[in-house]
Image (tube, coloured by chain):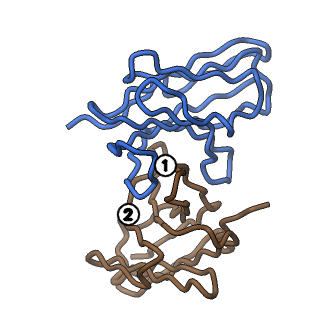
């Protein structure tokens, strides 16, 4: 079956531009997560959705970052006025758990590599 | 403050021998631990997990050991194969009311043929 897909795979943005990153989770997966992975680091949690509800956005680094999942399936991570420090791989993961219990495995997409010049 | 640490950025092992990857954590509230494997240009892939009520979990060539008193876990791969060459991430979480993984910085494993 299809896994988690993300688009675009690569994005180059000039400093100050807005970008939108898309995630298509595994069909039927209730939980969706966004992580940011800087070069040489592990993924860092950004935000979590259960269906369309954004239950945790504590990891979003600034108010320039915004995520949505309006119909409980596809999600978009938007970054406004990009800065060089936003350069990273943005990973999306989904899980079949009904409750926000991390004991259920998260399935990751291939990521979007964002480079801000 | 890094709550999950992988102090070895890289490891080289001969094919057929045992690979041991280590992970330390500081938060005693963590009660679920996972290992993910990552190839270049791909997302992390789940490998194996362990709950804090256990001290060992085995799946084929992969075994994870958990030492709660030392706040330490390790992943053993035996025998190691060239296809195991990848970056391995340790992750930890608190299962009661939370859902996010805290990842270590990864260990790059190279299995030499």
In the rendered image of the structure, the colour used to display chain B is brown
Chain letter belonging to callout 1: B
Q: Position of residue A63 (x, y in %)?
A: 76, 23
Q: Residue at x 62, y 19 (%)?
A: A78
Q: In screen coordinates, is A72 left or right of A49?
A: left
- Pick the residue in front: B8 or B111: B8
- Pick the residue in front: A81 or B65: B65
Q: Residue at x 51, y 64 (%)?
A: B88
Name the residue beneath numbered marker 2.
B47
| Separation of residues labelled 1 and 2 (CA atoms) | 16 Å
Location of residue B68 (image quadrant): bottom right
Q: In screen coordinates, is A70 left or right of A29?
A: right
In the rendered image of the structure, the colour used to display chain A is blue
Location of the N terminus of chain A by quadrant is top left
Name the residue beneath numbered marker 1.
B40
Chain letter belonging to callout 2: B
Q: Is residue B16 above or below residue A58?
A: below
Q: Position of residue B51 (x, y in %)?
A: 43, 72
């Amino acid at each position: 079956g299809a896994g988690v897909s993300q688009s675009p795979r690569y994005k180059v943005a000039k400093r100050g531009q807005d970008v939108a990153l898309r995630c298509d989770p595994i069909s039927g997966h209730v939980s969706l997560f966004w992580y940011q992975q800087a070069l040489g680091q592990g993924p860092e949690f950004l935000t979590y959705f259960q269906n369309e509800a954004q239950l945790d956005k504590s990891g979003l680094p600034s108010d320039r970052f915004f995520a949505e999942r309006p119909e409980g399936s596809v999600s978009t991570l938007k970054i406004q006025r990009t800065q060089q420090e936003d350069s990273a791989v943005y990973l999306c993961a989904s899980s079949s758990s009904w409750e926000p219990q991390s004991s259920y495995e998260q399935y990751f997409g291939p990521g979007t590599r964002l480079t801000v010049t | 403050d890094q709550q999950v640490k992988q102090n070895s950025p890289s490891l080289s092992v001969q094919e057929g021998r045992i690979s041991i990857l280590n992970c330390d954590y500081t938060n005693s509230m963590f009660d679920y631990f996972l290992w993910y494997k990552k190839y270049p240009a791909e997302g992390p892939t789940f490998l194996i997990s362990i709950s804090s009520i256990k001290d060992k979990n085995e799946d084929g060539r992969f075994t994870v050991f958990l030492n709660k008193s030392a706040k330490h876990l390790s992943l053993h791969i035996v025998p190691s194969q060239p296809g195991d060459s990848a970056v391995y991430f340790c992750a930890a979480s608190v299962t009661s009311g939370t859902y996010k993984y805290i990842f270590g910085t990864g260990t790059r494993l190279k299995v030499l043929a």
